[in-house]
């Protein structure tokens, strides 16, 4: 299946799971390591709007920077930082857990988001995913998603301002996420 080319200025929802449905995050230390790799590889080319890392899969919502903010290499090969992120994580896991082969199932899926309503729904979907999959009962109890970053003023890799404005502020953002 041919994937849509990544193009500057667009928003994408990335997601993938472990090969053969195995866990991709085996220990607590794997989550901050993956977040550190997102900061290293993804932040230079995009704004990160949301993420959720679960034992056997992940979701990542990004906005690729405009062409004027990117180098020629980043414009011509916008997929490369994503490849570097997933390869670095897989190699680290293979070494740490004495495993070989692909950690992830195929290439990450991605969907381009073109409408604000779809963007809002995707953010809520990503943040509510740990509840939907039974990892926690309440969205506030999950540590490895960007939801907590929105609720607190501490620095993070998340680009919050645009999203909070789109939701009409923090109170409405929380209300929209926590309503049943």
Image (tube, rainbow, N blue to C red):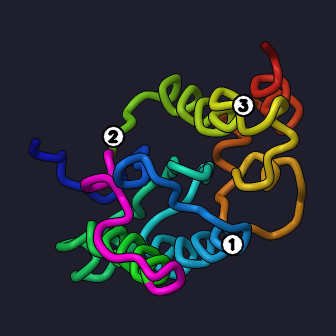
Picture disc at residue 76: none
Q: Taking 105 as reference, is 161 left or right?
A: right
**Is the magenta region chiefly helix, strand or loop?**
loop
Q: List the single residue furthest toward the bottom.
A: 95
Q: Which residue is mark 2?
A: 112
Mark pair 1, 2: CA separation: 26 Å
Residue at 86% x, 42% y is 141
Q: Which residue is mark 1?
A: 32
Q: Residues within 10 Å of mark 1 (few under 14, many from 20)?
A: few
Give the mark nearest the N terminus, 1 or 2: 1
Percent coordinates x, y for residue 36 in the rendering: 61, 77
Q: Nearer the viewer, mark 2 or mark 3?
A: 3
- Disc 3 and disc 1: Cα gap in Å? 20 Å
Q: Residues within 10 Å of mark 2 (few under 14, many from 20)?
A: some
Q: Which residue is mark 3?
A: 131
Does 12 appear in magenta? no
């Amino acid at each position: 299946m041919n994937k849509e080319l990544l193009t500057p200025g667009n928003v994408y929802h990335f997601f993938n799971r472990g090969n053969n449905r195995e866990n991709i995050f085996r220990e607590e230390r794997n989550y901050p390591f993956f977040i550190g790799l997102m900061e290293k590889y993804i932040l230079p080319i995009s704004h990160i709007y949301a993420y959720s890392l679960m034992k056997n899969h992940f979701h990542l919502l990004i906005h690729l920077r405009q062409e004027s903010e990117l180098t020629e290499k980043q414009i011509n090969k916008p997929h490369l930082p994503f490849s570097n992120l997933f390869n670095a994580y897989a190699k680290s896991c293979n070494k740490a857990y004495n495993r070989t082969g692909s950690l992830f199932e195929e290439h990450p899926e991605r969907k381009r988001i073109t409408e604000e309503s779809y963007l809002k729904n995707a953010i809520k979907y990503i943040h509510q995913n740990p509840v939907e999959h039974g990892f926690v009962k309440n969205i506030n109890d999950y540590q490895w998603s960007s939801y907590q970053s929105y609720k607190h003023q501490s620095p993070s890799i998340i680009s919050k301002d645009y999203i909070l404005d789109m939701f009409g502020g923090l109170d409405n953002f929380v209300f929209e996420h926590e309503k049943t």
